[in-house]
């Protein structure tokens, strides 16, 4: 596996992508902030380390509205 790990700028939740997300997709037009790329992982262990380091997993992390 190779995963890219990101933080959602709104919820602080962490989400994965199989492919690197271009910067223009990380940028939020609505508030001018961006989702952050936290790193890349080749193993689940590496991925979990990044998730914990950046504040945990959120079901809303993929950019869905919370509430
Ligand atoms: Zn925003």
Image: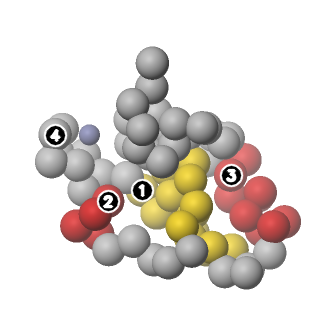
Q: Looking at the image, is mark 2 or mark 1 nearer the viewer?
A: 2
Disc with the residue nearer the chain's start (1 vs 3): 1
Residue matched to label 4: 30
Q: Is residue 52 above or below residue 46?
A: above
Q: Quadrant of residue 9?
A: top left
Q: Relative to residue 50, is residue 8 drawn left or right?
A: left
Q: Calculate the distance from the C-alpha at mark 1 to the C-alpha at mark 3.
A: 12 Å
Question: Where's ligand 1: which quadrant?
Answer: top left
Task: Give the farthest residue toward the top.
Answer: 67
Coordinates of residue 60 in the picture (x, y in percent) = 52, 36
Disc with the residue nearer the chain's start (1 vs 4): 4
Q: Is residue 11 above or below residue 43?
A: above
Residue matched to label 1: 36
Disc with the residue nearer the chain's start (3 vs 2): 2
Q: Calculate the distance from the C-alpha at mark 3 to the C-alpha at mark 2.
A: 18 Å
Q: Secondary structure at mark 4?
A: loop
Q: Residues within 10 Å of mark 1 (few under 14, many from 20)?
A: some
Disc with the residue nearer the chain's start (3 vs 4): 4
Q: Calculate the distance from the C-alpha at mark 1 to the C-alpha at mark 4.
A: 16 Å
Residue matched to label 3: 51
Q: Which residue is rendered at x = 68% and y = 52% of the image?
A: 51
């Amino acid at each position: 596996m190779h995963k890219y790990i990101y933080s959602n700028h709104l919820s602080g939740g962490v989400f994965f992508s199989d492919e690197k997300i271009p910067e223009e997709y990380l940028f939020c037009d609505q508030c001018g902030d961006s989702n952050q790329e936290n790193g890349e992982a080749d193993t689940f262990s590496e991925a979990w380390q990044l998730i914990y380091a950046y504040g945990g997993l959120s079901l809303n992390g993929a950019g869905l509205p919370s509430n």
